[in-house]
Amino acid sequence: MAASPSGGDESVEIFVTGRICLFGEHSDWAGGYRRFNSEVVPGCALVCGTDQGLYARARKTSGNTRVLRYTSSDDQSIELDLDDTTNLRQVAQSSSIFAYIAGCVLELGKHFRVGGAEIVNYKSDLPIKKGLSSSAAICVLIVRSLNMLYDLKLTVHGEMDIAYRGEIQTPSRCGRMDQCVAFGRAVTKMTFDSDLLSTESVRAASNIYMVVVDLCSKKDTKEILKCLNEAYPFPRRDVDKALHSLLGEINQEMCQEAQEILGDRDERKAAERLGQAMCKAQARWDEIAVPLCPHELKAPSLHRLLEFPALQRHITGGKGVGSQGDGSAQLVCKSEADQEEVMKIVKSMAMEPLKLTIPKQKAVRTAIVPVAGACSGMWPATKCVGPWLFPVRKHRMVKPAIAWLCEELVDAGIERILLVVNHTTEVEMTKLFKQREEVSILDGVGQHAEGYDEVLLAIGEKITFVRQEKPSGISDALVLCEQEVDGEAFLLAWGDHFCRSTSPENLSCVGQLLRAFTGRSVVGMHCVDKDGLHGTSVYACKEPPTPLPPPLGPRDVTAAAPALWPLSRLAEKPTREFADEHLVTPQLPAGNYLASFGHYILTFSTFRALRSNKGGHFTHILDELRLSEGVDGVLIEGERWDLGNMQTYIQCLQAQAQDDQAPSKRSGSR
């Protein structure tokens, strides 16, 4: 095991997984042929990070020299002068494991000038040269280390692109699929359209237990690729046309089916269906692809494994992986206990198994809360303190509004809170959430306050600061968070609002929104009259749910999920005349409109909309999402107040005072 970095600045911890292709092997390079033949169907693959990976610590080095020092987990090391491009090219073209490092710093140097760094890969449990993209993991590790150390503001896609271009400067000829190791253990859907790569996070609704098997046999990947590439870009024979179909529309259908299977909440059923889908995919591969390269793709060792009698009681199916042939395989196990048995059986067959668990993922793990903007509504008071720190009393305890919100987020299951801060608010949030209060102060306020200080510190462990130096708007704040969101859907809430639930189930406003999320962007809504149109986003829905859900209609105690309103129009701060003409929703009481509650769950596609609509208002970004993939609304049973407005802040304090006096008497949604 390698030694840790010594001395210098504070180090950062990094973990990069390997990757396995669940479905869609070979479609990455096939989709690339759309550059020459537009009739080639875009490639599609479902890939998953492995349980194993590379563990590293990285730190900046002191002094003016630009030297990268890298130490591998087996204590091999190299020093690379970042200014010596001739030597970097020589190392990149060598057969050394360090070629990937040199290639990546060469590529990074085309775009950024970074200082020296020391990267120590102190542990690695990722097998090398086993089809698990270990070389891509090294490339992403290098790029991510320098990105984090020097705040290059590269997105995950940016890291992937530089890592890919760095690796192809070496004798290795990886595909773009390999770089998905940058997304971690999550399942990712990748689409390959000519030179364009797009990705989508796929949520697994239940744990899937698998075993990846090194067949300990021989295959010639270059020969397989040579044979299959002869069918591209223009098919000449019937077998070529069949391969185009297999890697095109058939593959797209299989990936779509697998994505739907992963959303099944029944663990046993999901495993059964996924195994069957893999068996079907392998059968189609054997039927169509094997005739193009039979000497490599008949794969007797692979089929011996898939058909081995002792395995059948423990697995639901499986298939080859990577380039296919007798390289590696993946097996879907019926349960975690069956996974253990499969490991033993595979070892008895003189093959090498690795565990792979696709983890059940919460629908939303990350929340973004902006607390860096200018607050003109109560200026100049907000020069001293932002409305997110305004005190609000609830349950006879006075806390800053941001503390109430972060508590609610954590209680609802949010794992990470990204606070978008400027220099001043970072100091304020650090004091609130990350610094223990002075003992003398705690002694003066009582034991209950001392206990709450521990609560704040626990919340602080889930908080990451994202710096927005200038108040450039919510769109800019979101763009800054893209890398931290890591390809997943996220929750957005305003730090200067205060909300409270009126749900009979006592489900928080955040909890109500999370329960409504099905994979498509969803916005929290409440009803307002014409006087409430000013200063808010207003939505319209042509086909509201029937009957109307609470608080507008009766409660259906048998409903498994909240009713969703597919939004048909969005407008920011509309006039009454515009609202009457364009924003009327059928079945709502006359003069009532659907307005933003200030809580949103947005898919990762939001960042694509932000890039194509630079400088656009947040409502315009939502509207672009609505047009491209649809946006739903859900009525929140609760009240909310904008604390950046003096009138509503006073209303909030009055409502909370009344609530403390008579907790059973709550008014309806405002």
Image: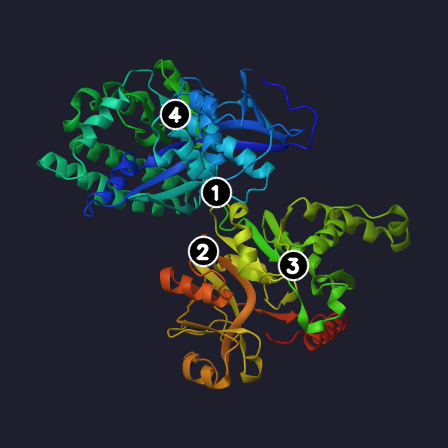
Mark 2 falls on what kind of element?
Answer: helix
What kind of element bears circle 4?
loop
Which amino acid, mark 1?
Val
Q: Quadrant of residue 119?
A: top right
**Looking at numbered disc 3 in the image, what kind of residue is underneath it?**
Ala
In the image, what residue occupies the spot 55% across and 27% down? 55
Locate residue 63 relative to residue 208 in the image: left or right: right
Earlier in the chain: of badge 2 and badge 1, it is 1
Q: Residue at x 21, y 33 (%)?
A: 285
Q: Does the CB distance between marks 4 and 3 fall below 8 Å? A: no
Task: Give the left or right position of residue 632, taking residue 239 as reference.
Answer: right
Image quarter in which the N terminus is found = top right
Label 4 crowd bin: few (<14), some (14–19), many (20+), radius 10 Å: many
- Residue 239, relative to residue 648: is it above or below? above
Label 2 vs label 3: CA separation?
A: 21 Å
Find disc 2 in the rendering and name its residue: 611
Q: Position of residue 192 (x, y in %)?
A: 31, 43
Q: Which element type, helix, strand or loop, lies under badge 1?
A: helix
The crowd level at tag 2 (other Cα within 10 Å; few <14, some 14-19, many 20+) is: some
* Residue with the mark numbered 1: 156
